[in-house]
Image: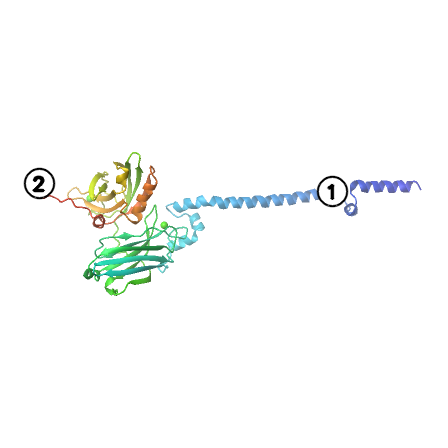
Amino acid sequence: MTTTPSLKATKHSNTTTAAPGFLPSLLDRIPLPRWAIYAIFAAGLLLILICLICCCVKCCCTGKKKKKKMPDETINMKGISGSTTAALVQPDAVDLEYGGSNQQRGKLQYSLEFNASRSELSVGIKEAAALQAMDSGGTSDPYVKIYILPSKSKTFETKVFRKTLNPVFNETFRYPIPQKELIESTLVMQVYDFNRFSKHDIIGEIRLNLSTVDWNHVIEEWRDLSEASKHEQEHLGEICFSLRYVPTSSKLTVIILEAKNLKKMDHGGSSDPYVKVQLILDQKKWKKKRTSVKKRTLNPYFNESFTFEVSFEQIQKVQLVISVWDHDKMSRNDAIGKIFLGCMATGNQLRHWADMLSNPRKPVAQWHTLLSAEQVDSTLALKHTLKIPFTNKIL
Ligand SMILES: [Ca+2]
Ligand SMILES: [Ca+2]
């Protein structure tokens, strides 16, 4: 009689020390020792914990990888040859660059007006739409170049619009031109993609035979851009130089870095290039310096620095003329191409000049496409210093 209650008591006390309620009775029914059950639980918990940690680590790592990819991308983009990584990252850009000739170039809206009494043609560049993307980011940096053939007297450029395929230019350019000449001319409007460190790409162009235009009305219309005609784009070459202006010391430093794809001027299919750096003030030649001659090359490397003293007041009105020449031993040196910078400049050249002024003390380098010397001279409208004939000089 006394044993049963004591047994019951011990059994009871056992259960109370473990855990009261449903769980202990469940554990009792499992045909395993308690330590084994606890071990299995612990192992299970550990496994879940490890899984959770793994998930967290994986998430964090992929996040970091995505962030890290950015600099790799830019390096690859800048690389000379498109690496496979770049191709994987930007498949669209690569496709566009090597796309067929049926590629949509986009369209341009322009206006034309001829003022007969003033013999003046006004060309309005309104806007462009759905332009072809020329850059890796799927955009372009468009600007428009305008000139008239066959005179090609003056080339105008609009402002550059960064990273857009639908720029609104709203700029008007005026050409003094007699009516007789007008109806024998062709107006060329070319849309380019600006690139700071490489040649600008032509997106497309519109060629208008001005004899077919009804000049009784102001014309405003949209037209699709077509592929630029190759034969007429006379390629003179490109030049890279850096500009630096220090207002406190009144020093303008021009470093002629290099040129490439220069026009062949000599019979051997080469040129002997050198560069003239000239400053023009009040339409007069003011200061002049030149680089050494690089023999028989179309891609000369100069890296020659020239410093001019130009006061802050003068820098506002000075024009910097950079011209590339071919040296000839036996005959007169020929100009290969020219460009000018300054507050009077337009487009890419004005941009470089403005960048220099807004970054005092900092050298700013940029590539430029050379224009014909005649074209630049006519734009500058230099007061030509009369060449005194040899006989007069003696007298
Ligand atoms: Ca560009
Ligand atoms: Ca030569």
- Residue 388: quadrant of the picture: top left
Kindly identify the amino acid type of the residue bearing the numbered disc 2: Lys
Classify mark 2 as within 8 Å of ligand 2 or not, answering yes or no. Answer: no
Kindly identify the amino acid type of the residue bearing the numbered disc 1: Ala
Position of the N terminus, as image quadrant, is top right
Question: Horizontal and vertical percent for residue 259?
Answer: 28, 44
Q: Is residue 228 visible?
A: no
Question: Which residue occupies 49% across, 45% down?
Answer: 67
Q: Is residue 361 left or right of residue 210?
A: right
Which residue in the rendered view is the most extreme toward the top? Answer: 249
Mark 1: few/some/many CA within 10 Å (<14, 14-19, 20+): few
Q: Is residue 122 visible?
A: yes
Classify mark 1 as within 8 Å of ligand 1 or not, answering yes or no. Answer: no
Q: Nearer the viewer, mark 2 or mark 1?
A: 2
Question: Horizontal and vertical percent for residue 231?
Answer: 26, 56
Which residue in the rendered view is the most extreme toward the right? Answer: 1
In depth, the one of 235 and 393 nearer the eye is: 393
Q: Is residue 212 left or right of residue 358?
A: left
Mark 2 or mark 1, which has the lower sequence index? 1
Question: In the figure, 44 relative to 142: above or below?
Answer: above
In depth, the one of 337 and 115 nearer the eye is: 115
Question: Horizontal and vertical percent for residue 202?
Answer: 32, 54
Position of the C terminus, as image quadrant, is top left
Marks 2 and 1 sit apart, C-alpha to C-alpha, by 118 Å
Question: Which residue occupies 42% across, 45% down?
Answer: 74
Question: Horizontal and vertical percent for residue 260?
Answer: 28, 45
**Which residue bears the numbered disc 1?**
36
Quarter of the picture for ligand 2?
top left
Q: Tell me the SS state at disc 2.
A: helix
**Which residue bears the numbered disc 2?**
393
